Amino acid sequence: MTLFSISMNVSRKFPQSRLRRTRFTSPIRSLVAENSLSVDDLIQPIFVKEDLDGIESIDSLPGINRYGLNALDKEIEKIQNNKIKAVAIFPVINPEKKDDQGSESLNEDNLVCTAIKQIKKNSELAVIADVALDPYTSHGHDGVLDENGYVENDKSLSLLIEQALTLAKAGADMIAPSDMMDGRIAGIRESLESNDFANTIILSYAAKYSSKFYGPFRDAVGSSTNLGAGSKDTYQMSVANIEEALHEVKMDIEEGADIVMVKPGMPYLDVVKAVKDTFKVPTFAYQVSGEYAMLKAAIENGWLAEEVLEESLLSFKRAGADCVLTYAANEIAIKLNQ
């Protein structure tokens, strides 16, 4: 019997019990709050664009920009001043560098490796680097395609493992495989261990769904054009499934993942709770681009109050998430620091 079920057996009757008593004043409401949101719960995603001078706005992500390397330090300084502890880096590479194998992902001097080195040199932030081929492939998929356009799992693994090692060498604190290929965590962990990166963390996108909430992100990194009408249904999870998510998470933990992540976030809070309750491991969630964009659009049109962003993030904590990747991290951190 759980503690929750025991507590629900307590007999509470009106007027001896008035549940509104503990809601009477703001200080009391804060004292009895079951969950809270702090800056330490937030990770800021950031887009870096090759050969960009300065910054470039992203129409589908209000308030979010792409940064050239010459503008990156100022943004990193702002993030650090807001007391955020980590950033997740996503590259926007030149289209001419894309090919069917995603070869540029293995270049130790590529855009994301250069950005990682720059951030680590000039800040104390932890850097999370995605392991995925879609920013680098001409077809927009996360792996190698066969002659029928099917993503070949085992042939993709060697590229993903090498990409992960390349990112570790650049100084990434966390390697974040988001590709959803079977067996990639075991291969990456073995490679990190054998190359003296035993303390490099694997943050696995363990339960990543084939969602329609990713549109603004794909616009931001330039993969939407390459993917076109293509689908990632054969490797990302069906939106209908939750037990499958638990199998994915279990396998990733057993293969060496230190932290697991659920993506998207708000429509999948049931999955976040199930993962945390089942495995009791550090569990992150990603409030993805579509979630952020729809909330910002509603706020900007006056349909919702600004506080809905903070409310949405608190719901992640209530579901059991230890940390949230959110495009609102900077904005919310400013409020939390006041």
Image (spheres, helix red, strand yellow):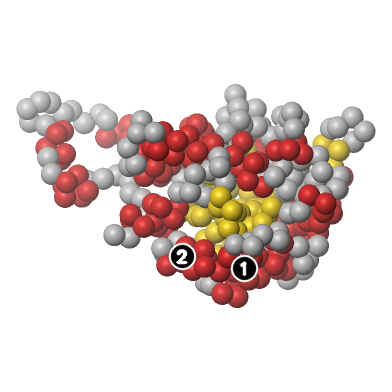
Horizontal and vertical percent position of residue 142: 76, 43
Query: Which residue is more in the foreground, 98 or 322?
Result: 98
* Amino acid on which the number 1 mark rests in the picture: Asn
* Residue to which mark 1 is pinned: 70
Position of 306 with respect to 163 (left or right) is left
In the image, 150: left or right of 271?
Answer: right
Q: Position of residue 37 (x, y in %)?
A: 36, 50
Q: Residues within 10 Å of mark 1 (few under 14, many from 20)?
A: few
In this rendering, the label closer to the viewer, 1 or 2: 1
Report if residue 149 is visible in the image.
yes
- Mark toward the start of the polypeptide (1 vs 2): 1
Q: Please identify the quarter of the rendering in which residue 166 is found.
A: bottom right
Q: Name above or below for residue 300 compared with residue 133.
A: above
Q: Residue at x 92, y 33 (%)?
A: 147
Q: Residues within 10 Å of mark 2 (few under 14, many from 20)?
A: few
Horizontal arrangement in the rendering, residue 158 relative to residue 207 (left or right) = right
Quadrant in which the N terminus is drawn = top left
Q: Nearer the viewer, residue 195 or 62?
A: 62
Q: Amino acid at mark 2?
A: Lys
Contact, mark 1 vs mark 2 (Cβ under 8 Å): no
